């Protein structure tokens, strides 16, 4: 859609920077780990109507999806695996 195209154009420089720096920082993997560790709280948040937590989880998932789309389109499976399996030295 047109909105998706505008989003991609607006965020391409940030995504390119992340692709370059992520092997050193591990930011994408960290974001995914934090999101996965907090998913257990989503059911409780929905039951308690904690809209702020649900909104934050939605935004994190949206960011992960957008970044993975860029990563997948720009690198091989092996490179992607390296980006997602960062280990602090």
Image (tube, helix red, strand yellow):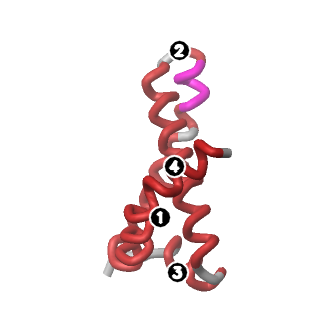
For image coordinates 45% across by 62% down, the residue present is: 12
Q: Position of residue 88 (x, y in %)?
A: 34, 76
**Rounded to the nearest whole Å, what is the CA distance between mark 1 and mark 3?**
10 Å
Query: Which label sits on residue 29?
Result: 1
Q: Counting residues from the N terminus, which is met first, the one under dot 1 or under dot 2?
A: 1
For image coordinates 55% across by 45% down, the residue present is: 62
Q: Position of residue 48 (x, y in %)?
A: 53, 14
Q: Secondary structure at mark 3?
A: helix
Mark closer to the observer (4, 2): 4
**Rounded to the nearest whole Å, what is the CA distance between mark 1 and mark 4?**
22 Å
Q: Which residue is denoted by mark 2 in the rendering? A: 49
State if disc 3 and disc 2 touch (CB < 8 Å). Answer: no
**Rounded to the nearest whole Å, what is the CA distance between mark 4 and mark 2?**
30 Å
For image coordinates 62% across by 71% down, the residue present is: 72
Q: Is residue 84 above or below residue 62?
A: below
Q: Position of residue 66 (x, y in %)?
A: 55, 54
- Seen from the viewer's position, the closer of residues 25 and 47 is 25
């Amino acid at each position: 859609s047109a909105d998706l195209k505008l989003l991609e154009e607006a965020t391409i420089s940030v995504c390119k920077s992340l692709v370059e720096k992520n092997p050193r920082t591990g930011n994408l993997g960290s974001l995914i780990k934090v999101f996965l560790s907090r998913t257990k709280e989503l059911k409780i948040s929905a039951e308690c109507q904690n809209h702020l937590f649900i909104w934050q989880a939605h935004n994190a998932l949206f960011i992960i999806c957008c970044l993975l789309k860029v990563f997948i389109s720009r690198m091989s499976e092996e490179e992607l695996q390296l980006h997602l399996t960062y280990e602090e030295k």
